[in-house]
Image (cartoon, rainbow, N blue to C red):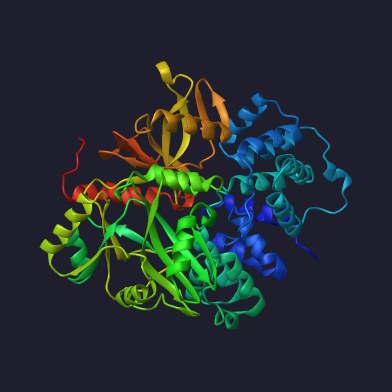
Amino acid sequence: MQTTFKALAELCEKLEATRKRVLMTSLTADFLNALEPEEIEPAVSMILARPFPKWSPLNLEVSWATVSGIIKRVTGAEWSAFTEAFSKSGDVGSMTKALFENSGVRRQMALVERPLTILEVRRSFEQIAEAVGHGSREKKERLIEALLSQASPLEAKYLAKIFVGDMRTGLHEGLMEQAVARAFGIPLEEVQKASMTVGDVGEVAAIARKEGLEGFSKISFRVFRPVSLMLAQMANDVAEALKEHDGKTAFEYKYDGARVQIHRSDGEVRVFSRRLSDATESLPEVVESVKENISAKEAILEGEVIAVDNQGFPIPFQHLMRRFKRVHAVEDTAERVPIRLYLFDILYLNGKSLVSVPYMQRRQMLAENAGKIPLTEQLVTDKTEEAERFLMEAMDAGHEGLMAKRLDGQYTPGVRGKRWLKIKPVLEPLDLVIVAAEYGYGRRHDWLSDYYLAARDAETGEFLELGKTFKGLTDAEIIEMTRRLKELTVKDKRGKVITIPRIVVEVMYNEIQKSPKYKCGMALRFARISRIRDDKSVEQADTIQRIREIYERQFLKKGRYKTG
């Protein structure tokens, strides 16, 4: 018998009601253990607020403006009731539940004998994603309305959360891995390793359910399934990097570009962005270069794409982002914003995973297979003076700084560690999320130009504000930002809009200060937006825990102000 979507919603209610990690893991493990094999991956994805697994090319392509309009239509709610419901909860799902409970509308579910199941909800998501071309918007709206019309208030709450990609139960991916390990009796380290390799914990859970630990022995990289990226920590300077890497390391230029993961199999090439979304159509030059130069039958490579001017000098990041958004008239954009690819790692070659191979050996294999595609500029040294000179050369060439990579370091997908360190000779920027905005003054009175900045609490999923800024964006960017934020708005009152957290921006600041004004107890001093990070998802933005670490690190070089 198929498991109902209501059962999944009830699990999420229990998760939302507790902050005890052990209980969350236990509840989720028990739920997974009771599912049919084919329900495992869809259930895991939905519990993590994903309509599809990470590797899926499917995308709902539905804005919050569309979803909210359908919710109002289904419930008969006025905008005032809509904003009032959000004011009480501050959560899109809870707001949706309240509207459904108060609507008094007898929905179609009363005429349907059987309830929604997990697999039926997945099929509805697939139909919505597959609606493309002429008339697709109307078809998507009909499908969403049909799905919500069958939903109870509780089910509608979690459907809305999945539509906006924000579950806020506190069950993050790490806890889900623990739940999978517990549910199917697999050692946690094996689940974590498999999740890194496959790139999706839902698929790992399905393998665990069907084949147990034996199935994990068959897991390997699959070409055209993007792999979670290895991440770097910050280092204050080259001396710190050398010390951390036992006195000798590989320094490489840190380009002001967009990280890409390139998959090749036979004659086919696909390019994935930092968010692991398919960017192949937007970057035809990368595809052609790989086809011409990479002779390996199968390979997974990593590189950096930068935008350059007609003399080959790097130009600002925001110009590059235009390329990633473009899928039509690419040739025209390519002529105006030419790009250059630099390779820096190889993860897979002709059927063999290379993540356990030491970095310098991987670098040599990359050089042997890159053809004429340039590798990132590199210096291997144990001398501080040489490294500092190399850093200056990188800065003079218009790049951001350096990466330092441990010579014997393995590649650890999805992990931020000290095997890779990034060195920037400026104050460490933060990737924050816009959660609200206000209309400006004077000539900006029609634009949402004052932005409230927040970081995600990794423990609870809540977004905690750190301050606001009106600085950094051009008029054109503010106009586009206004359009995007209006589509994400859930409450509009007296010139201030509250939005679904979706847009990531890189923020510069002078200092992180202690502040009773904000719930997190911290605030940014002189914050200004340096660029819009459309290449990053909300999950890839900085957490409040990391910002606290930076706040504490400030006092390694200066004293604290003491009260009393």
- Residue 441, quarter of the rendered image: top left
Q: Residue furthest top?
A: 442
Q: Does residue 533 appear in the picture of this structure?
A: no
x, y percent for residue 244? 22, 66
Q: Residue at x 45, y 50 (%)?
A: 536
x, y percent for residue 46? 63, 56
x, y percent for residue 490? 58, 33
Q: Is residue 522 left or right of residue 69?
A: left
* Depth check, front residue: 79 or 87: 79
x, y percent for residue 356? 39, 78
Q: Is residue 559 left or right of residue 452?
A: left
* Depth check, front residue: 441 or 262: 262
- Does residue 407 sit above or below 154 in this rendering? below
Q: Residue at x 38, y 33 (%)?
A: 473
> If the image is split into quadrants, where does the N terminus sit?
bottom right
- Does residue 46 sit above or below 558 in this rendering? below
Q: Residue at x 66, y 26 (%)?
A: 79
Q: Is residue 91 left or right of residue 319?
A: right
